[in-house]
Amino acid sequence: MDDETWETVNSLALKLDSHSRLTGELAWLGQALKLSEETGEVAEAVIGALGLNPRKGHSHTWTDVRKEACDVAVSALVLLARMGGDPRWFFEEHLRAIRSRDLPGEATA
C-alpha cells in the first residue's frame, strides 16, 4: 500500500481518537467491535446478493459486498493505527510472515 493509503488510515485513527471519550485499551476495544460490526455487514450483503432472506429478496449486489469488504479492511487498519506504534511496519511485517509461511518460493514484487 502506498503512502497516501497509510496517511488516510492514520488520519482516520487520529480523528476517531479526538472524538472518543475512550482511551487506551477501551478505545481499541471499541474499534475491534466496529471491525466486528463491519464484518456482519459483509455477511448481510452476501445474504442479500444471494437473495437468501425471503422477506427481503435480492437486497444487495456483489458490488455492495465488495464495498463492505473494503470497510472491513479499513476498520482493521484503523485498529492497528489506533493501537500505536507504526501500523504500516506491523502490517507489512505480518504480511511478510504470511508470505513466507504460505507462499514459500513465490516471487515478491
Image (cartoon, grey):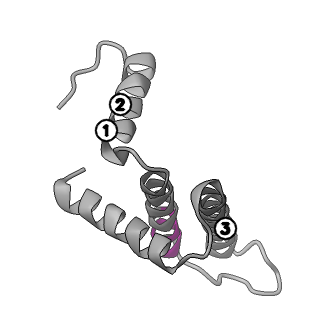
Which tag, 2 or 3, sits closer to the chain's start?
3
Instruction: Between residue 94 and residue 60, name the one nearer to us.
Output: 94
- Residue 96 x %, y %: 34, 27
Under mark 3, the amino acid is Glu
Residue 4, horizontal then vertical, whole percent = 19, 62
Q: Residue at image x 38%, y 44%?
A: 85
Amino acid type of the residue that numbered disc 2 sits on in the rendered structure: Glu
In which quadrant is the C terminus drawn? top left
How many angstroms separate mark 2 from mark 3 (CA)?
26 Å
Numbered tag placed on residue 31 in the rendering: none
**Which residue in the rendered view is the most extreme toward the top?**
105
Disc tally is 3
Which class describes the residues within 10 Å of circle 1: few (<14), some (14-19), or many (20+)? few
Residue at 66%, 76% in the rendered image: 48
Q: Earlier in the sequence, mark 3 or mark 1?
A: 3
Which residue is tagged 1? 89
The residue wearing badge 3 is 37
**Residue position marked by numbered label 2 in the rendering:** 93
Which segment did they paint magenta? 64-69
Q: Residues within 10 Å of mark 2 (few under 14, many from 20)?
A: few
Where, by quadrant of the figure, is residue 56 drawn? bottom right
Q: Is residue 4 left or right of residue 78?
A: left
Q: Tag 1's secondary structure? A: helix
Picture quadrant of residue 94: top left
- The answer to whether mark 2 and mark 1 are in CB contact below 8 A is yes
Question: How far from the left and from the top, in percent, is residue 32?
Answer: 63, 57
Residue 40 placed where, x, y %?
Answer: 68, 66
Q: Is residue 40 left or right of residue 85?
A: right
Please rate how many residues cluster around mark 3, counting C-alpha atoms within 10 Å: few if below 14, some from 14 to 19, many from 20.
Answer: few
Q: Report which quarter residue 27 is drawn in.
A: bottom right
- Decide whether the magenta segment is chiefly helix, strand or loop: helix
